[in-house]
Image: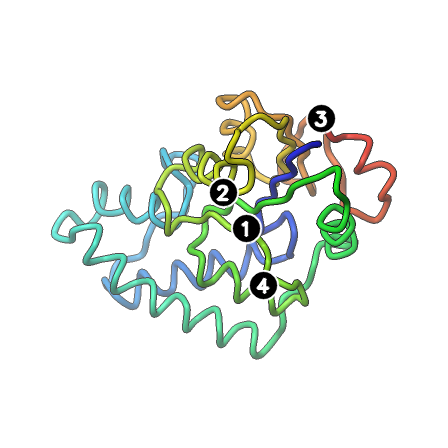
Amino acid sequence: MQHIMFDIDGTLIQSYEFDEKCFMDAVHEVTGIAIKNDWETYPHVTDRGVLQTFIERQVPQYSLEELENRVKPVFIQNIEQTIKESPAIEVKGAKRFLLHVLNNNDYIVSVATGGWGETARLKLQSAGFDTDNLIIASSNDHHARIEIMAIAQAKADPSKGLPITYFGDAMWDVKACKTLGVNLVIVGERVQHHQRISDYSSLETVLGLLS
């Protein structure tokens, strides 16, 4: 058996750009300050981790709990409005591939996203994914991506004995997988990696990259 773990934005659905805008708009609405989106300089590029660094760099008057409690509902509202106007779109072939591995006894499946769990489910459902039985770890669980991945692993594979292949799309996914010694497949064009796919349209190609 193998454990297949997915990121969401840019990996399963084409949501990276609108998710970023909704988040930045929510932060600005709450604080009146524009958050700097040079994400590569943030130690933890997760919703909670970004807020943590934003506080340290720009708004030290806030506690993390206070800011998260104020930003999250605005962000959720922004996402709801955005997908109401224009539903999220899957990365080509993502739903078919996810269903294939979910329905195959050779694999266990989880999601480890840097986003908050509430918006993760909203976006996936908007794009037509069934989330009822999907194991999801998110920024609700921790501010650090490697810890979110570890939580997803523990939820899906309590023995932690199965090899993992992680599907992601960004440099922080590369760093996390290198730290954890996890097999990585990059989806899309944002990052160069020796294992990279444009989408999931070729089931045979994608399955060939599993650890």
- Residue 88 placed where, x, y %? 63, 66
Between disc 4 and disc 2, whose residue precedes? 4
Q: Looking at the image, is 78 positioned above or below residue 140?
A: below
- Residue density around tag 1, few if under 14, some if 14–19, many if 20 or more, within 10 Å: some
Give me the residue at 75% from left, 51% from top: 103
Between disc 2 and disc 1, whose residue precedes? 1
Give me the residue at 15% from left, 47% from top: 60
- Residue 141 placed where, x, y %? 37, 47
What residue sits right under mark 2 in the picture?
155
Depth check, front residue: 167 or 84: 167
What residue sits right under mark 1 in the picture?
135
What residue sits right under mark 4 in the picture?
132
In the rendered view of the protein, which quadrant contains the C terminus? top right
CA–CA distance between discs 2 and 1? Answer: 7 Å
- Residue 130 placed where, x, y %? 64, 64
Whether pointer 4 and pointer 3 mark residues with C-beta atoms closer than 8 Å, the reply is no
Between disc 3 and disc 2, whose residue precedes? 2
CA–CA distance between discs 4 and 1? Answer: 9 Å
Q: Secondary structure at mark 2?
A: helix
Whether pointer 2 and pointer 1 mark residues with C-beta atoms closer than 8 Å, the reply is yes
Q: Which mark is residue 211?
A: 3
Q: Amino acid at mark 4?
A: Asp
Instruction: Mark 4 vs mark 3: give the one in front.
Output: 4
- Residue density around tag 4, few if under 14, some if 14–19, many if 20 or more, within 10 Å: few
